[in-house]
Image (cartoon, rainbow, N blue to C red):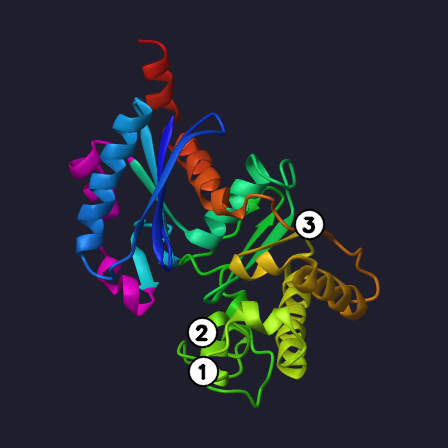
């Protein structure tokens, strides 16, 4: 049984999961400072009491690069800069009495969908989350890619899709995220929301440019990782086929000729993707603890 904490863009989401079954969930707003840690610990204790459970491990997701060696976050956006190089393992032990695993949020979402989610059993997959930013992750032969320093697979949103494009906050030029994300839309339009962008044809040219950027990003990921399935997730996918269908069409039209087009999936419960992945990771990292608890 695992406790899962997802430090998201606007909310910190919590869940207790047992064998893939979600026993309870909660969320609290993000404040963007160190008080988020105390709030997360307090909300976690309340959720454990509410569900009357005894989790044996904790999974933590962060919106940044996690070092495979130390489990600490190497880089994050400004909102979570206070977590940079913070020892979340020690925090979990002292505040909640649990051993922890720490993972990038997009990678955790991919693991969640390929373990107990919409792409269960798939071993070669990529995931793209379209929301405030563009998150990505990749898996080859059942192994989530991390690389030497934890950057592998998660920087697809920072692939250059326009060499004449704007400078991205990451330092690269013409990144997909700088051209077609919720924060990019706010900068490129007069307060237009993604929902409004897809509700009418008033901004058809801008909408089409976003779809082309997302399509080009997916093509790049398919060319790089040769997956059998592409998982499209994130808040922007609430627009349904208006987003997913053009991306799939673009990808199929621009793939390397000899490649077999992957299957495209939009998870029915994307809000649980990260928690499912964290549960799987925590259970894998601490199997002996779970086994001991079951045999007491």
Q: Is residue 221 magenta?
A: no
Q: Are dots 2 and 1 in contact, CB under 8 Å? A: yes
Residue 208 in sight from this viewpoint: yes
Dots 3, 2 in contact, CB < 8 A: no
Disc 1 element: helix
Is tag 3's residue or tag 2's residue first in the polypeptide sequence?
2
**Measured from the top left, where is residue 210 in percent x and y?**
61, 75
The 10 Å Cα crowd at callout 2, few under 14, some 14 to 19, many 20 or more, is some
Q: Mark 1 highlights which residue?
A: 187
Q: Quadrant of residue 167?
A: bottom left
Where residue 286 sits, quadrant-wise, is top left
Q: Is residue 76 above or below residue 206?
A: above
Q: Residues within 10 Å of mark 3 (few under 14, many from 20)?
A: many
Q: Secondary structure at mark 3?
A: strand
In the image, 223 versus 196, the foreground residue is 196
**Left or right, residue 178 beside residue 103:** right
Q: Secondary structure at mark 2?
A: helix
Q: Magenta stretch mostly in which secondary structure?
A: helix
Residue drawn at x 39%, y 79% as measured from the top left: 169
Residue under circle 3? 229
Rendered location of residue 144, percent (x, y) = 53, 47
Identify the residue shown where x is 48% and y is 71%. Answer: 182
Alpha-carbon span between mark 2 and mark 1: 7 Å
Which numbered dot is residue 183?
2
Q: Nearer the viewer, mark 3 or mark 1?
A: 1
């Amino acid at each position: 049984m695992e406790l899962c904490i997802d430090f998201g863009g606007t909310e910190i989401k919590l869940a207790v999961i047992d064998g893939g079954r979600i026993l309870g969930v909660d969320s609290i707003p993000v404040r963007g400072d160190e008080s988020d840690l105390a709030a997360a610990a307090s909300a976690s204790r309340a959720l454990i009491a509410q569900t009357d459970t005894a989790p044996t491990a904790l999974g933590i997701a962060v919106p940044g690069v996690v070092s495979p060696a130390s489990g600490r976050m190497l880089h994050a956006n400004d909102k979570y800069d206070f977590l940079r190089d913070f020892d979340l393992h020690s925090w979990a032990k002292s505040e909640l009495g649990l051993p922890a695993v720490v993972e990038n949020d997009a990678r955790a979402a991919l693991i969640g969908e390929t373990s107990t989610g919409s792409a269960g059993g798939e071993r070669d997959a990529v995931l793209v989350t379209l929301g405030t930013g563009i998150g990505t992750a990749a898996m080859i032969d059942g192994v989530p890619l991390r690389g030497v320093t934890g950057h592998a697979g998660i920087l697809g949103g920072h692939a250059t899709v326009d060499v004449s494009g704007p400078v991205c906050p990451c330092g690269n030029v013409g990144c997909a995220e700088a051209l077609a994300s919720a924060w990019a839309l706010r900068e490129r339009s007069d307060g237009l929301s993604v929902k409004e962008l897809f509700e009418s044809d008033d901004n058809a040219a801008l909408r089409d440019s976003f779809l082309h950027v997302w399509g080009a990003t997916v093509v790049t990921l398919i060319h790089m990782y040769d997956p059998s399935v592409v998982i499209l997730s994130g808040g922007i996918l609430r627009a349904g086929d208006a987003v997913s269908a053009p991306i799939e069409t673009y990808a199929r039209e621009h793939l390397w000729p000899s490649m077999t087009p992957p299957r495209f999936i939009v998870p029915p419960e994307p809000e649980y993707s990260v928690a499912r992945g964290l549960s799987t990771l925590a259970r894998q990292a601490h199997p002996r603890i779970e086994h001991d608890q079951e045999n007491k």
